[in-house]
């Protein structure tokens, strides 16, 4: 199993290759804010693990195995960002948190988060009541169900 740093490298390589069609040590170092020597060291490890093809001073390319890991990490992050923003967390914070969380979640948790995000996204144009209630609760600190219950009690008292 790969660690967080290795996954970050694979994802960076994946993104750089998608943007430019190829990548080099210098590009990866800039993206991850590390020294080129550090990148070269990690690339040697990833190459030995069969995740990349690395030709010193020429290029870096992902193998199918490396692409799969990079796509999985990217998908986990995208799901987490969508989930966190649905909770009302600002996107910039959600992206930072997702980058941290994406490496430690169990695959079953990711699967259920993916299902939950899909469920929310595929709801009819009008938001579901529970989501509106949650957003109201976040804004006001008052649970909409408590407010409705309180109003029923008041009406009942007035009718008696």
Image (cartoon, rainbow, N blue to C red):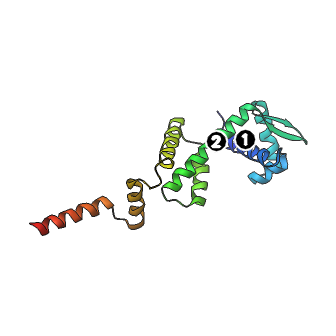
Which residue appears farthest toward the bottom when viewing the image? Answer: 158
For the image, the number of numbered tags is 2
Q: Who is closer to the viewer here, 107 or 118? A: 118
Density class for disc 2 (Cα within 10 Å; few <14, some 14-19, many ≥20) is some
Quarter where residue 133 is shown: bottom left
Q: Secondary structure at mark 1?
A: helix
Q: Is residue 19 above or below residue 44?
A: below
Out of 10 and 151, give the one closest to the viewer: 151
Which residue is most to the right? 57
Q: Quadrant of residue 33?
A: bottom right
Q: Which one is earlier in the sequence, the residue at label 1 or at label 2?
A: 1
Whether pointer 1 and pointer 2 mark residues with C-beta atoms closer than 8 Å, the reply is yes
Residue 82 position, x and y percent, is 55, 51
| Residue at the extreme left | 160
Q: CA distance from mark 1 to mark 2?
A: 9 Å
What label sits on residue 84 in the rendered view? Answer: none
Residue bearing mark 2? 73
Residue at 27%, 62% in the rendered image: 148
Quadrant of the snapshot with the N terminus: top right
1 sits to left or right of 82: right
Quadrant of the rendered image containing residue 72: top right
Residue neighbourhood size for the residue with mark 1, other residues' Cα within 10 Å, grouped as few (<14), some (14–19), many (≥20): many
Q: In this image, 157 relative to 86: left or right?
A: left
Find numbered disc 2 in the image and state the secondary structure of the residue it sits on: helix
Residue 102 left/right relative to 59:
left
Figure quadrant of the C terminus: bottom left
Q: Which residue is label 1 attached to? A: 10
The spot of residue 50 in percent (x, y) is: 76, 30
**In the displayed structure, does residue 42 sit left or right of residue 79?**
right
In percent of width and height, residue 156 lies at: 14, 64
Q: Position of residue 149 (x, y in %)?
A: 24, 60
């Amino acid at each position: 199993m790969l660690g967080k740093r290795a996954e970050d490298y694979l994802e960076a390589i994946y993104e750089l290759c998608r943007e430019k069609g190829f990548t080099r040590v210098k590009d990866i170092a800039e993206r991850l804010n590390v020294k080129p020597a550090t990148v070269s060291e990690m690339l040697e490890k990833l190459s030995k693990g069969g995740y990349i093809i690395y030709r010193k001073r020429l290029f870096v390319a992902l193998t199918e195995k490396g692409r799969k890991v990079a796509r999985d990490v990217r998908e986990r992050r995208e799901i987490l960002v969508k989930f966190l923003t649905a909770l009302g967390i600002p996107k910039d914070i959600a992206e930072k948190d997702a980058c941290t969380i994406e490496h430690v979640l169990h695959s079953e948790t990711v699967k259920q988060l993916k299902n939950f995000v899909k469920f929310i996204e595929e709801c009819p144009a009008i938001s579901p009541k529970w989501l509106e209630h949650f957003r109201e609760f976040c804004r006001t600190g008052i649970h909409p169900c408590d407010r409705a219950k309180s109003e029923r009690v008041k009406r009942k008292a007035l009718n008696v």
